[in-house]
Amino acid sequence: MTDRKVKATDRKARATERVARTTDRIVKAVDRAAKYGDRTVKVVDRAAKYVDRTVKVVDRTVKVVDREAKYVDRTVKIVDRTAKIVDSPGRAMERKAESNG
């Protein structure tokens, strides 16, 4: 039982480090793109393995929010390290369909 707890703690620590590295990349991308104030960012960085996680941008710092977190006002999608503001997740799908032809 004790061994299992230790292993779980190690896994959690490694996951926290991964989130921190991912968050750093997102912060840099958001900083480069613009100031978004209190918005929600949807992570679509394929390399990050955090697709469909959401992070909250508050005063240009990024905090990881639950997977089930609701979108606030607008969504900022970071795609290829550039940020695009989309009106809503539904509208994002429409624009994706339009851009595909």
Image (cartoon, rainbow, N blue to C red):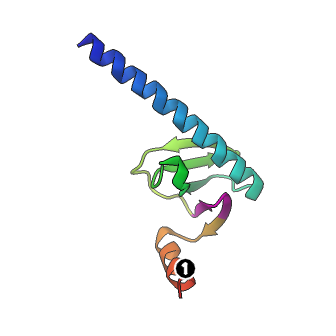
Residue at the image point whose x is 74% and y is 55% from the top: 35
- Could you say which quadrant of the image residue 70 lies in? bottom left
Q: What amino acid does circle 1 point to? A: Arg
- Region of the chain picked out in magenta, as a range: 74-83
Tell me where residue 78 appears, x and y as whole percent: 61, 59
Predominant secondary structure, magenta span: strand
Q: Secondary structure under badge 1?
A: helix
Give the labeled residue for mark 1.
95
Res 58 seen here: no
Q: Is residue 98 above or below residue 7?
A: below
Q: Is residue 92 above or below residue 47?
A: below
Residue at the image point whose x is 58% and y is 42% from the top: 22
Tell me where residue 62 appears, x and y as whole percent: 62, 43
Q: Residue furthest bottom?
A: 101
Q: Is residue 53 magenta?
A: no
Tell me where residue 7 appears, x and y as whole percent: 35, 20
Q: Residue furthest top?
A: 2
Q: Residue furthest front?
A: 47
What crowding class fits label 1: few (fewer than 14 Cα within 10 Å), some (14-19), or many (20 or more)? Answer: few
Residue at the image point whose x is 63% and y is 52% from the top: 38
Res 57 seen here: yes
Figure disc tally: 1
Tell me where residue 1 appears, x and y as whole percent: 23, 13
Q: Is residue 77 magenta?
A: yes
Q: Is residue 11 left or right of residue 24?
A: left
Q: Is residue 4 left or right of residue 70?
A: left
Q: Is residue 71 above or below residue 3?
A: below
Q: Nearer the viewer, residue 80 or 86?
A: 80
